[in-house]
Amino acid sequence: MKTRNWALTALAACAIIATAPAARADVVQLGFILDRSGSIGSSNWNIIVNGLATAVNNVIPVGGPDTYEITVVTFAANASTTAGTSKVLVTDAAARTALGTAISGLSSAYTGGTTNYTAAFTLMDTTLRSSTAGATATYINFATDGEPNPSNANGLAMRNSMINTATDGYVDNISIEGIGSGLDAAAVSFLKNSICFPGPCTTLPAVNFPSQGFYLKVANAQEYAAAIENKLRIVTQQVPEPATLPLLGAALLGMGLMNRRRKLS
């Protein structure tokens, strides 16, 4: 009888797998917030935007199980984005190349000025929420070389709104690069403990991504360029789906993880 019960259980498990819907393609939103304030400087700004453009061209996959929607917001006293860098669906190599070119073109957007975190997060939120792509996951990368200026423009209220699922929040991860030596201990603490998400923020490069945010100290713009490419490799890595019954447990775990992803409303 025990053998028969075990066999029935195995058959039921097979039925679950056989009747489960095929894995569908997901749209993953990636938002990049880039500091173009006066302390960055035009030369470093060019390195930063070209570094991000190169990373996008080198790393963002096309033709895989996920499609990536990319938005780049730049900020100083005010925040801005462009048609070529806002809610861009990277559906093929041509779209990826065009996006990289548009990001490189942001070199002309450098203005200098103050460091208004609130403007940056507000525009990113408005842009991502207006997407019609049906995203199932949203990850934000925030790169800055200074504390908020003025100090009350720290972006905290908007950041909290974006992550709070009880009030229509949708962002799954916020990770940070602190560029250069202009961030003192208090500023680093604020970024790690109040902006980074989910906590506790780690200083290691995304070992538990996306379930843990990370803060990465980079010495200069050149290091940012290398760091953002490595970060994108972590974000876009693909995990093979189990294909056989002995991996049923792994399959169910994978289904659970998929269910944790949230659609934008």
Image (spheres, grey):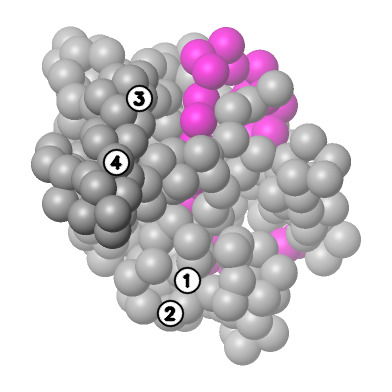
Front one among 171 and 36: 171
Crowdedness of circle 3 by 10 Å Cα count: few (<14), some, many (20+)?
few
Q: Quick check: 62 above or below 184?
A: above
Q: Which residue is mark 2?
A: 203
Mark 2 or mark 1, which has the lower sequence index? 2
Give the number of the disc on residue 70. none
Q: Which residue corresponds to mark 3?
A: 20
Q: Is residue 100 visible?
A: no
Say which label, 4 or 3, has the lower sequence index: 4
Magenta-span inclusion, residue 45: no
Q: Quick check: marks 2 and 4 in contact, CB under 8 Å?
A: no
Q: Give the foreground label among 3 and 2.
A: 3
Find disc 1 in the rendering and name its residue. Answer: 215
Reading the chain from its start, which is encountered first: label 3 or label 2? 3
Would you call the spot at circle 1 few (<14 residues within 10 Å), some (14-19), or many (20 or more)?
many
Label 3 is placed on what type of residue? Ala
How far apart marks 2 and 1 lie (CA) works out to 5 Å
Characterize the local packing of mark 2: few (<14), some (14-19) or many (20 or more) Cα atoms within 10 angstroms: some
Identify the residue shown where x is 44% and y is 64%.
Answer: 177
Q: Which residues are magenta?
A: 124-149
The residue type indicated by label 1 comes to Tyr
For badge 2, the amino acid type reads: Thr
The amino acid type of the residue labelled 4 equals Leu
Q: CA distance from mark 1 to mark 4?
A: 50 Å
- Measure how far apart labels 3 and 2 are at the Cα level: 39 Å
Looking at the image, which residue is at 19% across and 25% down? 64
